[in-house]
Amino acid sequence: MGASYWCSVMATALFSSTTAAQTFLASQQSGCPDATPEEEKLFRLIPVPTPRIETKGRLQLVGINAHLAAHQQADFAKIPQAWSLLSSRMVQLEGKTNRSSAFTNVGAPNRFSGYEVCFGAGGGNFYFMPAVEVSTTRFVPPGMTVLVLPPQRYAVFSFSGQRADIGNLRYSIAKTFWKTSKYVRADAPNITVYPPGDTGRSETVELQFWIPIKP
């Protein structure tokens, strides 16, 4: 069962390039693998905010799926490539994207929340998927992935601060929060949610970490 901080720290060049959309069933998805001791050296402990507990409804996502090789620190730079590829194909999703935002207090017309989903692929490997929420999964463009998540209970950590501390917070949650928490992680995908309008270029960021927990 994986730690949440590893959801979007790494990516690989093996982006999905199939001729038809791939659908991952909920029963096939598991959590992200934990980082190795060597990888942990990249991060430091910082204070962890108190999460709120929420049950999210069924979530339909379409994005660019990438299979991630375990322990490949050199692949960190591949993350913006995945987002860039999704951004370049957004026009193909016109009319299908769900404008409702996970950030109900952020109003940004014609902008959409960005999701980073991480789920296990066995052997310490995992999948990284930048995505957007859609109102329909019909007519998904070739080479894009459909990911339908069932209703799930989450510990939702809100973060507002330096973008450079995103990995540190994920690491801190994984290393310290669960040791004293009454909640238990569920073996399901971890999700990072960025607000509408975030370009990834600013030094500061506002986002949410959705970490699945057992009922």
Image: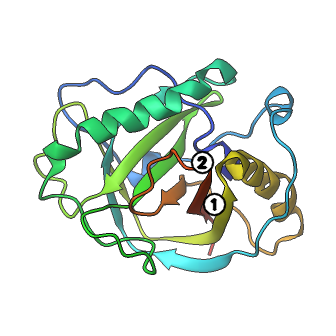
Figure quadrant of residue 97: bottom left
Q: Which residue is mark 1?
A: 186
- Tell me the SS state at disc 2: loop
Q: Which numbered tag is attached to residue 196? A: none
Which amino acid type is shown beneath numbered disc 1?
Answer: Ala
State whether residue 2 appears in this view. Answer: no
At which x and y percent is residue 104?
42, 79
Image height check: is 134 above or below 200? below
Residue 103 horizontal side relative to residue 132, left or right: right
Residue 92 horizontal side relative to residue 119, left or right: left
Image quarter in which the C terminus is found: bottom right
Which amino acid type is shown beneath numbered disc 2?
Answer: Gly
Tell me which residue sits at (64%, 50%) in the image: 163
At which x and y percent is residue 73?
68, 23
Closer to the camera in the image, 31 or 39:
39
Tell me which residue sits at (14%, 43%) in the image: 92
Closer to the camera in the image, 177 or 158:
158
Image height check: is 185 above or below 140? below
Closer to the camera in the image, 187 or 131:
131
Between disc 2 and disc 1, whose residue precedes?
2
At which x and y percent is residue 186?
63, 60
Whether the residues at callouts 2 and 1 have beta carbons within 8 Å, the answer is: yes
Residue 8 horizontal side relative to residue 59, left or right: right
State whether residue 112 appears in this view. Answer: yes
Tell me which residue sits at (41%, 55%) in the image: 114
At which x and y percent is residue 47?
85, 63
Image height check: is 24 above or below 156? above
Q: How many marks?
A: 2
Q: CA distance from mark 2 to mark 1?
A: 8 Å
**Crowd around label 2: few <14 · some 14–19 · many ≥20 (10 Å):** many
Q: Which residue is mark 2?
A: 31
